[in-house]
Image: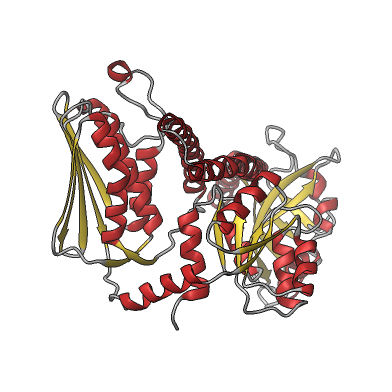
Amino acid sequence: MKKTAALTISQARFQAFAELASDWFWETDTQLRYQYISSAEAQYQAHTYQHFIGKTPIELRSYDEQKQQKKWGRFINFVNNHKEIHNLEYEAKSHDGKTFWISISGKAQFDENGNYIGYMGIGRDISYAKQRELDLQKEKERAEKANAAKSDFLAVMSHEIRTPMNAILGMLELLEDTDPTEKQHELIDYMRSSTRLLQGVISDTLDFAKIESGTLKLELSDTHLINLTKNLVKQFETQAIKHGIEFECAIDRSIPERINCDGVRLSQILLNLLSNAFKFTHEGSVKLYLTKSDNHIIFRVADTGIGISESDIARLFEPFTQFHSRQKGRQQGVGLGLSITRRLLNLMGGSISCYSTVGEGTEFIIRIPYTIVENIDEESVIDDAQKQSQTSLKVLVAEDNIANQFVIKAILEKRNYTVEIVNHGQEAIEALSNGEYDLILMDMMMPIMDGVSAAKAIRAELGLQNIPIIALTANAGLKDKEKCLDAGMNDVLTKPLDSRLLDSKIKQHLFSSE
């Protein structure tokens, strides 16, 4: 009687645990048909499992699960070999024809003689977790689509704005060659300044989007640090004289001439800091110092401007943040410059800090790691430049925009080059089939045949491997550049076209000494 009572208590305890547990227990026969399910009668469960009795998991699969042949092939192999089942997740049919997700684990059972008698294990309803997983996947896909749409929108906007901007800046450069009066010179300067401001806003917005999406990459190259700094200083000397501000640049003798870094991004960082210094300094001075410490170059930009409060410094590097609106009215730009500066420095492995006192001035200190590049033969550079100035190149330009055709042709002819203009890639191929050229400038997006397709055809079908092809594109993305280079182009220039950079690229690809 004691043993019977103990057995009854044990059975009641097990039954209570089985009914209260979120998991349920199951047993099958040798054919894997469910013979026992602990919660078969539990009406409070999300799903009842009474209809499982007498059926196998394979018979209880949903229509979608029946398509997963590889998954269920592995399951059958496990069962035939009496292996343990661990967290098999599948979509099952409920008694009313609906579907829900369960997870089962179990192990084979044998009698005292070692004969296989079926499986036993536990099951769990995972419909809620699976729904969350599916919802997260949908949200991820929706976010990826939104991000792709944003990238496409930015690429299109970049192209549509940069194309006419290229024509405007090119026209201004040509206008300066017409011997304008002093007043006209002043108007040209105002126009160029406004256009550069618009270009800066577009570039900052695109850079921020690329940084946010993780697609912005540094392009390391041999950078003449001293010349880079001096060129930046020249850009601000006229502004300093015009506003009566003392401008000083001091470069320590220990600073190496050439370093391996992304010169374009370093220029962008310094340009942004100096622009802000001049923007908020009405009197006094702006100073730029270059020093060296260990394996870092230190740049200090100090001004005697209106200063920044301690509370504002804490938010200074947040995107879309602008200060000093009461002191100087609405500031130009979108408030991305310093945010981009810090993120670029993070990519470089550098840092930036700010120290300021309201009414006294501000100092920014940036540190970047560097590696020295050995000096190249300066005489060969001079010889290359002389060779370029004395040579008349025959240049083929593929460009569909009429205004840009006029500008590019005028800029090249000013350099004593012979220029032929075509409207799309197919015309470029025809021109190359009928004549010889020293250089091809290829727009990326054109009707009939785009620049990428044309470049591939020039290299593969025409077999012209040695002629340099430089892309001229209003698309500023890294993927666009990679697409051009993969097609066989030698270099990529982004519109608005910088004529000095074009000269540099022509020298690099046509006149550089072996």
Relative to the observer, which residue lies in front, 20 or 348? Answer: 348
Relative to the observer, which residue lies in front, 406 or 369? Answer: 406
Q: Residue furthest top?
A: 326
- Quick check: 53 left or right of 219? right
* Residue located at (80% from left, 63% from top): 426
Residue 289 in the image: x percent, y percent?
17, 49
**Colour mode of the rendering:** secondary structure
Residue 79 in the image: x percent, y percent?
73, 70
Q: For residue 132, say whether it is visible.
A: no
Residue 496 in the image: x percent, y percent?
54, 47
Relative to the observer, which residue lies in front, 442 or 366? Answer: 442
- Quick check: 425 left or right of 194? right
- Quick check: 289 left or right of 375? left
Vertical placement of 306 versus 288: above or below? above
Q: For residue 291, say whether it is visible.
A: yes
* Residue located at (75% from left, 40% from top): 48
How many marks the image carries: the answer is 0
Quarter of the image where the C terminus is located: bottom left
Q: Quadrant of residue 45?
A: top right
Residue 105 in the image: x percent, y percent?
64, 59
Q: Quadrant of residue 416?
A: bottom right
- Quick check: 336 left or right of 29? left
Vertical placement of 415 versus 462: above or below? above
Q: Quadrant of residue 322?
A: top left
